[in-house]
Amino acid sequence: MVASNIAANVASATNLSVAPSVASLAISTQIESTLPATDDSTINKPQIIEVGTNARQGVVTHTVKAGDTVPSLAEKYGISSNTIKWANDLTTDGLTVGTKLKILPQNGVLHKVSGGDTVTSIASKYKANASLITTFNNLEITGLTSGKTIVVPGGVLPTAERPGYVAPTTSSVVRTSYASSFASGSVGNRYALGNCTWYAYERRAQMGKPVGSFWGNANTWASAAGSQGYSVNNRPSVGAVLVDTAAGYFGHVGVVESVLSNGDIVITEMNNAAYGGFNIVNDRTISAGQAGLYLYIH
């Protein structure tokens, strides 16, 4: 009873989010202490701070049995297949008998706390709710301790940290055939030969998706296209013009050649100093995370 009263006072004085629950529990403890003893002269005392059923359960260990698969275990434990895969570094649904798996109490990720971590930074990394992380792991009481593994409820593992992830490679294949075929330009191309805008005009014409002849430098293409009724957004698609307004004063444009299954995109472009420069066409792969930072003219 004394311990629960102290906990209630501390929680109230420090404005912890669990203060109301602790106070209620302290009152219940006082009431129970006045009740007659049971037949075996014992009184069941509640825990100072109650947590949800899932939190009490915590991370459990499952030893794989014959017939177990990631989907079957996901159904058994009521969590997603990805949650199991992420926690155990699995790339397929198949499992080896005898393997010990970490099973989270709910969908999310496991995170090992390192120096400099805060609840806010962890929530941001996994696109999760900071309050849920705090409450689920009793961090109001224990705080973040370096080396401790916590559950991030509802967390999503970043793409680059997922099992089997392979970082995209940037291709610098020089397509000189493109440059030679565009030596004279097509009718309507009013852009300077050898520049990114000149190439984008020609490539779109090849695809049957013409663009305007007077959109100016690359940094004004998106606004010019929008004013002429073209769709402009942050979603890449095959044939779309990628607009990079941050690439120097004049900006830069390229053309999306393909969108890969993992969200990466392959573009072709001209006059990229890193891949040949003036009047040279190259192709390169842009990761899914970076692809969403550009504008696309459709």
Image (spheres, rainbow, N blue to C red):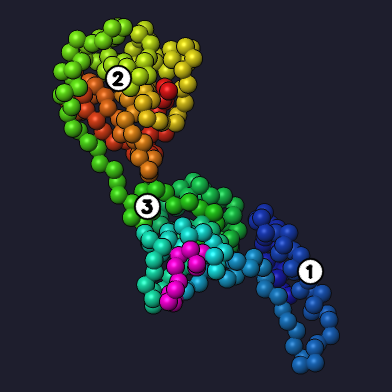
Disc 2 is placed on an element classified as helix
Magenta region: which residues? 63-74
In the image, residue 269 lies at what x, y percent?
26, 24
The image shows residue 68, relative to residue 247, as above or below, that is: below
Q: Residues within 10 Å of mark 3 (few under 14, many from 20)?
A: few
Residue at left offset 66%, top offset 55%: 17
Indicate which label's residue lies in the foreground, 1 or 3: 3
Quote the CA–CA distance across marks 1 and 3.
46 Å
Which comes before the other along the chain, label 1 or label 3?
1
Label 1: which residue? 27
The image shows residue 35, relative to residue 133, as above or below, that is: below
In the image, residue 58 lies at what x, y percent?
54, 69
Label 3: which residue? 161
Indicate which label's residue lies in the foreground, 3 or 2: 2
Which comes before the other along the chain, label 3 or label 2?
3
Label 2: which residue? 206
Q: Residues within 10 Å of mark 1 (few under 14, many from 20)?
A: some
Q: Are marks 1 and 3 in contact (CB under 8 Å)?
A: no
All told, the count of numbered labels is 3
The residue type indicated by label 1 comes to Ile
